[in-house]
Image: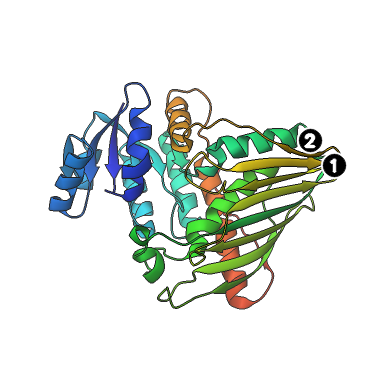
Amino acid sequence: MNWGLIGASTIAAEHMIGAIRAQSGNVPAIVLSSDAERGAAYAKAHDVARATTSLEEILADDSVRAVYISTTNEKHLPQALAAIRAGKHVLCEKPLAMSAGEAAEMVKAAKAAGVVLATNHHLRNAGSHLAMKQLMDDGAIGDVLSIRIFHAVLLPDHLRGWRLNSAAAGGGVIPDIVVHDADTVRFYLEEDPEAVSAIERTSAMSAGVEDSAMSLWQMPSGVQVMTHESFTHPYATTGFEVHGTEGSLHARNVMTQQPVGQITLVNKDGAQPVSYSAHSLYERSVQKFVAAIEGQGTPAASGVDGVKSLAVAEAVKSAAQTGQRTLVTYPEMGK
């Protein structure tokens, strides 16, 4: 299957081009960049056959069956809708759009067109999270009481720019990282947050967008969730903890793009390390997307998953701005 890369992005270069090529017969055949010179250099550097500044050129190419969208967030909706209208399957970076309502438009359009829409939420593909989820489902920690997420990092220099200075492009730690945490919690608990309370902070590192947030989430089951996201913490360690009536799962350095980190199961018998598969998160995401196109199962994270993670992030933003507990509103997405 030939792919069109919509966006000459860092994440495509560092993770997705290789993940696509890891699937037998899958080829990143053309890349879109708004700058012709940069696009040509990017294509040459990553051995992509063609570069273009025209989205229409990619969508008119019948040999291209799927597109991967990794442009800035405000471009996702029009680019995805155009690709869907052209009959292309779409794997889109998170957040799917600038609002959950816009993202729901993408879901409805994909359903009507009969194409696969998936969200590139990578964490639910990690061997660490898959292993912890399996232990939780097997009853290793009893009934789940709470989840604590530590997702404060120092944003690398090469990923700054619009993430720190452009609300219009979808910048800020809430649309960038809270969506990941929302998707990961939904993956573990298989339920949707009902209400949130939150605070946010904008430091001297940013220009007009929040770069740190903390929030508390109410789940339908009664499980309590606490999260901390930031772009400004140079020495923090990421982590994910699930606490239950019969034990706890402690994971460190697992909220990353790499198959790394340590997991410990703690119960009445003491502390035991947990092993897990060290496969590529992005290769698994692409593999499940390709399989879904061929009618074999569903993507790791669907378009619906992308809508719901964005709805949670919107509620966190609203709660932080108003200082009020905020109900999470999930848009209608059709049958």
Q: Seen in the image, is 190 located left or right of residue 51?
A: right
Name which quarter of the figure residue 132 lies in.
top right
The secondary element bearing badge 2 is classed as loop
Tell me the residue at 48%/64% (across/down). Answer: 231
Q: Seen in the image, is 33 located left or right of residue 146?
A: left
Nearest to N terminus: mark 1 or mark 2: 2
Tell me the residue at 61%/35% (across/down). Answer: 130
Residue 140, numbered label: 2
| Foreground pick, 2 / 224 | 224
- Is residue 162 in sight in this rendering? yes
Q: State the residue position of label 1.
A: 246
Residue 277 image point, x, y percent: 56, 30
Q: Give the CA separation, mark 1 to mark 2.
A: 7 Å
Residue 172 image point, x, y percent: 46, 66
| Foreground pick, 80 / 9 | 9
Residue 81 image point, x, y percent: 36, 47
User: Where 270 sits versus 205, above or below?
Assistant: above
Name which quarter of the figure residue 73 lies in.
bottom left
Tell me the residue at 29%/45% (across/down). Answer: 6
Are the two marked residues, 1 and 2, in contact with CB atoms closer than 8 angstroms? yes
| Foreground pick, 25 / 149 | 149
Q: Seen in the image, is 193 located left or right of residue 299?
A: right
Residue 99, numbered label: none
Task: Say which quadrant the C terminus sits in.
Answer: top right
Residue density around tag 2, few if under 14, some if 14–19, many if 20 or more, within 10 Å: some
Residue type beneath disc 2: Ala
Q: Seen in the image, is 191 located left or right of residue 118?
A: right
The secondary element bearing badge 1 is classed as loop
